[in-house]
Amino acid sequence: MASSDQRTDGWTLVLRRQPACIIEGRPEGGYTDAFELICCDCGDDPDRAYHELPPRLQLVRGPYQIAAGVAAYQHHSRLHQELQVICQPSMMAHAG
């Protein structure tokens, strides 16, 4: 099911190099050596700067060094997969 808050380019979770600054939704001034985790399913918006986010999204976003960022990405992805399994209606409830 698609909703209006889903990314139109198909992704909802990404580990990206942290921009030095975001102006009008675009990275400006190059990139830092850190990485950040953007999760649209959690309500993050890749066009918003880190300081514009609520504290809970800042915790998810990072910043991370590359190895820690990859681990955080994998962990966060598994959490969403487990949540989908938990939230799916039981197949047994539909059985005759």
Image (spheres, helix red, strand yellow):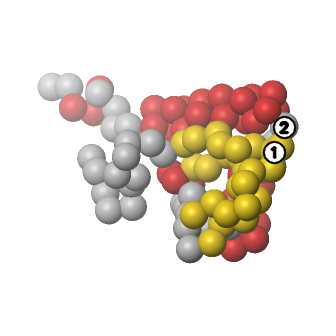
54 or 82: which is nearer to us?
Answer: 54
Secondary structure state at the residue bearing disc 2: loop
Q: Give the residue type at disc 1.
A: Ala
Counting from the top left corner in percent of width and height, residue 90 is at 34, 32
Q: Which mark is residue 65?
A: 2
Q: Give the residue type at disc 2.
A: Gln
Counting from the top left corner in percent of width and height, residue 17 is at 70, 44
Q: Position of 7 compared to 74: left or right?
A: left
Residue at image x 45%, y 42%?
11
Residue at image x 72%, y 30%?
70
Task: Give the vertical position of 8 relative to 49 (above or below).
Answer: above
Characterize the local packing of mark 2: few (<14), some (14-19) or many (20 or more) Cα atoms within 10 angstroms. few
Task: Give the vertical position of 69 relative to 44 (above or below).
Answer: above
Q: Which mark is residue 69?
A: none
The residue to which callout 1 is attached is: 34
Residue at image x 21%, y 32%?
94
